[in-house]
Image: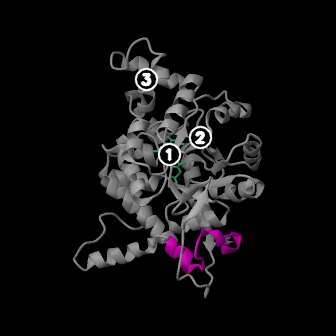
Amino acid sequence: MARHWADFQYEIYLNGMTGTVPRLPTDLSRLEELTERRLGPGPVGYVAGGAGDGSTARANRAALERRRIVPRMLRDVAERDLSVEVLGRSLPAPVALAPVGVLSIMHPEAEPAAARAAAAQGVPFVLSSASSTPMEEVAAAMGDAERWFQLYWSKDREVTRSFLGRARAAGFSVLVVTLDTPLLAWRPRDLDRAYLPFLHGVGTANYFTDPAFLAGLARPVREDPNAAVTHFVNLFADPGKTWPDLAFLREHWDGPLVLKGVLHPDDARLAVDAGMDGVVVSNHGGRQVAGAVAAADALPRVAAAVGDRLSVLFDSGVRGGADVFKALALGAEAVLLGRPYVYGLGLDGQSGVEHVIRCLLAELDLTLALSGHAGPATVGPADLEEDAG
Ligand SMILES: Cc1cc2nc3c(=O)[nH]c(=O)nc-3n(C[C@H](O)[C@H](O)[C@H](O)COP(=O)(O)O)c2cc1C
């Protein structure tokens, strides 16, 4: 039977009868400010910060805000089912947790805590290549729950080949290849504090446990950590890659393959030509190119170009259930949730992440119902209008 996500609100009100209120806000857009107050400026700056003057992150929000839902009435929404099939995987709702690196800067339990929260709520967890915990440990924390692996496409073929083999063996089902980070972007909040966790060997766990990576070191990491960090920096990403290189990944990954960071319809068409199974329309939460197109503005154009040929997913700016609804209406099959779950982790560990997931899906369930939909399948462009502002 489909899960009744909206019932979370009754649970909250019932708990209130005994004087208990939620530990974290239920309006997820308030989490950033709370995290700023509770955690040190370095980690929060890294998470909240964007490229340049932050204009892309603001544009992401504005593009979602500008689109308004036009609710429909008397459509029988008594029984609702949020489940979807995406990339051949059955999901309880059209949402997964986005890949976010170095979660140990937010909470000591880091990725395993977020992954356990995702598993407990049945939502896929997308593990970053730049996690602070090796992928096998994260997998072990999840049992057989749905997990996807995000690849930062290394300069070193052997390291990439090894990562794919390890991810497969550890039960990751979908490969998400991030294309928008061939170089670290200009990020003033990190630059002003000279804050980059990787240089301290934080966020390098998958590399420092990888046989192919270790084979490139003269001495073990523990004996010469600086050399290990330098080796990591040198091979982490590759600005020289081009579309034909995707054949290598297709050859070494037999599951669904998704390209993250696609914004132009022509790039989406190239993804189809390269035999990809999906794209994530994303500008990395505004962390890469200041002045870039808002992800929600790029989404309908990409969906129109390729939506019938591969799966179109979306992230960048999702802060609540209404945003998920809007992304579905603009052509996404599913949405990745980024910063809000990271703040939930920073504020309250695994429980904080579970709180964020439950709030988001309760609000999505209610938004669907109150707009006249019994599930994601019937949501479309006609449900939105643009606020000329
Ligand atoms: C602190 C932080 C670290 C991130 N690390 C990664 C990463 O390792 N790999 C990746 O593909 N995307 C990474 N992202 C981007 C997210 O997957 C996602 O695209 C972004 O958070 C969406 O924007 P939003 O959080 O503002 O909604 C990161 C984002 C943040 C905020």
Q: CA distance from mark 3 to mark 2?
A: 21 Å
Q: Residues within 10 Å of mark 1 (few under 14, many from 20)?
A: many
> Which amino acid, mark 3?
Val
Looking at the image, the residue that sits furthest to the top is 218
Tell me the residue that label 1 is attached to. Answer: 99
Along the line of sight, the residue nearer the viewer: 373 or 37:
373
Mark 1, mark 3: which one is toward the viewer? 1
Which quadrant holds residue 58? Answer: bottom right
Name the disc covering residue 178, or none.
Answer: 2
* Depicted 304 relative to depicted 249: above or below: below
Q: Position of residue 36 (x, y in %)?
A: 36, 52
Q: CA distance from mark 2 to mark 1?
A: 10 Å
Q: Residues within 10 Å of mark 2 (few under 14, many from 20)?
A: many
Mark 3, mark 2: which one is toward the viewer? 2
The reply, left or right, for residue 74 in relation to residue 12 is right
Along the line of sight, the residue nearer the viewer: 379 or 348:
379
- For the residue with label 2, is its CB less than 8 Å from the closest atom of ligand 1? yes
Please indicate, yes or no, whether residue 190 appears anywhere in the rendered image: yes
- For the residue with label 1, is its CB less than 8 Å from the closest atom of ligand 1? yes
